[in-house]
Amino acid sequence: MFKAIFITILVLLVQGIYVNVFPQSYDTKYTVEYTLKDINGNMINKIKLFRNGAKMKFSKVENKGTDKETTTDIYIFKDESMVYTVVSNSAGKFGSKHALDLSLVGMQTGVYILDLGNDGKIFNSSSRAGTGTVLGYDCVKYTIASTAEASSDYYMYQDNLMLKRFVGSYTEGNTIEALSFDNTTDVPESMFVVPAETVY
């Protein structure tokens, strides 16, 4: 009995020491605006990312100001391990639900956030290729080669949030990069409310 209590206390102490010695080392409250550019640097579209703790939201507007205007909002809830995608247009709001997956979010948005569940298959020590700077922020650079001519370079701020990605070769490819990064302005909880009228 006493041995079991002693072991329990010891485990709790070790966990407490671990939390204090190895605290979370990346921001969890910020707003980022990204742009997608073609190989010539021409802007194709923009997308915004909002984060407050375990809640994130990507938002993109297409055909703004026309009768075909469409807004795509992607809500990511780490605590629920769920991703909700809501497309809004003149016909209504239509959505889909998926289990949270780092690669899924990356494919939907072009942006990778490693604390969403990096399994080490892509972003690992062997794919690290040095460092770089985006918007004046120091980043860890990962290079993933797909062919002899083409590769993908990812610049991860605080080794967690992607601020820039180049995909392809120098004759054909595209770039996603942050135009702005704000970790001082508050991000309200109301930002992360999935519309109740969404049709799934």
Image (spheres, rainbow, N blue to C red):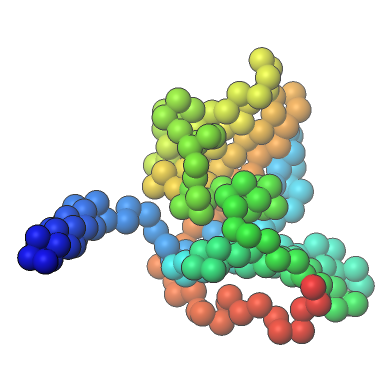
User: In the shown orientation, is residue 200 left or right of residue 162?
Assistant: right
Residue at figure coordinates x 62%, y 35% from the top left: 166
Image spot of residue 140 (x, y percent): 43, 37
Image spot of residue 183 (x, y percent): 42, 63
Q: Quadrant of the N terminus?
A: bottom left
The front one of 130 and 197 is 197
User: In the shown orientation, is residue 19 left or right of residue 120?
Assistant: left
The number of numbered badges drawn on the structure is 0
Residue at figure coordinates x 59%, y 39% from the top left: 165
- Among the 4 quarters of the image, the one containing residue 28: bottom left
Image spot of residue 74 (x, y percent): 67, 64
Farthest residue to the bottom: give it: 196
Report whether residue 12 is seen: yes
User: In the shown orientation, is residue 198 left or right of residue 102?
Assistant: right
Report whether residue 157 is seen: no
- Among the 4 quarters of the image, the one containing residue 198: bottom right
Q: Is residue 142 above or below residue 71?
A: above
Residue at figure coordinates x 65%, y 50% from the top left: 104
Farthest residue to the top: give it: 148
Image spot of residue 38 (x, y percent): 74, 39
Residue at figure coordinates x 51%, y 79% from the top left: 189
